[in-house]
Image (cartoon, rainbow, N blue to C red):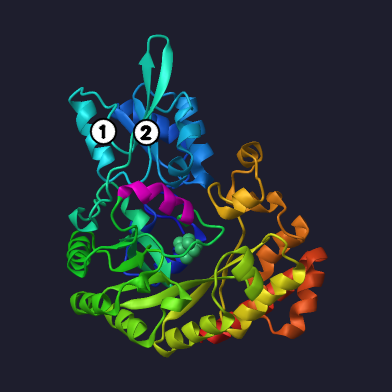
Amino acid sequence: QIAKNGKKMPPAAIAFYKQTDYSLEDLVSKDPAVDILEEFSKKISEFKPSLIAVSSMTTNYYQSLEMIQKIRPKCKVIFGGVHPTLMPESVINEDVIDYVCVGEADEALVELCEYLDKNKDTSNIRNLYLKVKKGRKVIIIKNKLRPFVNLDTLPPPDLSIFDHRYFFRPFLGKIYKGIYMSTARGCPRGCAYCVNNRLRNIYKECGRRYIRFQSPKIIARNITYIKKKYGINWYKFSDDTFLLRPLADLLKLKKLLKPLHIMFGCSVDPVTVTEEKVKAAKEMGCVSMSMGIETGNEKIRKYVLGRNISNNQIFEAVRIMRKYNIKISTFNMIGLPGETKENIFETIKLNKKLNIPDANVYVMYPFPGTKIYEDFHISRKKFKNIPAMEEAYLFNLSNVKNEELLYFLRTFNLYLVLPEKYWQKIEKARKSPKLYTVLIQIAQEIINKNLD
Ligand code: SF4
């Protein structure tokens, strides 16, 4: 199949096209394969910005930095996001970076733009680390953080800068126009593999409450605006724990969102799942919930990962979500410190018992700033050499060989779909691509049958 512009259609787009109201050109109007560095460099020379702002997590920090180092733009460069917030000193020491934003940039970035525009001195802007020349010396100024922003004062997101194809998302075999949207900030937990604890410490000087919710009125205002202006009808609330809100707040939100007829997915913590809250979420348009199980072994979950959640609490949460016909997905990690092959099978078995057909599984990545990163004394040098999420197994934190970890990553969902009588064959298929293909076909048949 060829689109009108002569470009070939990717197979996935052809499959979805048949089930959507959008035109072929809507979905694939030009070849999306571009050289990012070339495209970025072209944009910069055409647009001639005064400031480049890069938001980065650890997994894309080194790649973003490398791009800036290769292009060496003539304008100012600011880095913000989780990684620069956790490691501001090392980031500001890069010679291509002029500013680092520590913490939330909602107000600091606007202030920086205004100051640069008016040629004003930027050295006292709160939340910013910056370099200043004093004679021959370069000194680093570390400004204090400002109080947290009130989420209700933020405008709705401006989506006009995005290519409209960015919004298309598949869900249960159909394509919807969807976006990620944040309605709260902060999380009460302190998981050992998460930067949340460290962020809470950094934000201590911000004074006000670390956990904040946008009011139901503002959420409804934003969704009404986005739906009308961009035709977005699918939302993924990217809040750490959507059901953390008090029930009264969720009931208000339900009243306001129900008439908008939207669909949304969200992440939940098993201990926040109650009948009343899930019922309210369902009635306001919730169709899917994802939940972190991380491991099937309760002791590893509690003592290594710092998540004091029992398997019984997970079962109860799943029971309630199923009662309200919510699609459930789980997040799982392998390659955990001290983990054995048997422990990985405990995680597979727990997902299987919960009847989860498609689990998300990752090899644990010891992000800087997390307890696990500190506990295992991971050096920055080692970190710089292993930046990609997919290469996290190279940290060698578990007792499982790397090749086995990678095979578990590939076959985790195969174990969930195929009955236990096939499990030995999955193990054998590691050395037999032919057998592996056969098992995939059997799994596919089971999935198709379930869809029917
Ligand atoms: S529940 Fe999620 S966001 Fe909260 S600390 Fe744990 S991993 Fe981080």
Eyeballing the image, is 98 above or below 64?
A: above
Contact flag, marks 1 and 2 (Cβ < 8 Å): yes
Which residue is the extreme one toward the bottom?
Answer: 323
Tell me, yes or no, if residue 349 can be seen here.
Answer: yes
Q: Relative to residue 351, is residue 2 drawn left or right?
A: left
Q: Position of residue 418 (x, y in %)?
A: 68, 81
Q: How crowded is mark 2: few (under 14 residues within 10 Å), some or many (20 or more)?
A: many
Residue at 24% over, 51% down:
158
Residue at 34% over, 26% down:
76
223 in the magenta segment: no
Which numbered disc covers residue 112?
1
Which numbered disc covers residue 366?
none
Q: Give the range drawn in magenta.
A: 197-206
- Give the dominant element type of the magenta stretch: helix, strand or loop: helix
Q: Looking at the picture, tell me which residue is in the foreground, 243 or 359.
A: 243
* Disc nearer the start of the sequence (1/2): 2
Q: Relative to residue 7, is residue 423 drawn left or right?
A: right
Amino acid carrying mark 2 in the image: Ile
Eyeballing the image, is 368 above or below 144?
A: below
Q: Name the residue under label 2.
A: 78
Q: Where is residue 147 in the image (x, y as percent from the top left)?
A: 27, 48
Element at label 2: strand
Q: Looking at the picture, tell me which residue is in the foreground, 388 or 106.
A: 106
201 in the magenta segment: yes
Q: Where is residue 61 in the image (x, y as percent from the top left)?
A: 50, 40
Eyeballing the image, is 333 above or below 38?
A: below
Tell me, yes or no, if residue 296 can be seen here.
Answer: no
Q: Residues within 10 Å of mark 1 (few under 14, many from 20)?
A: many
Q: Relative to residue 88, is residue 218 drawn left or right?
A: left
Q: Tell me how many marks there are.
A: 2
Amino acid carrying mark 1 in the image: Leu
Q: Position of residue 28 (x, y in %)?
A: 39, 55
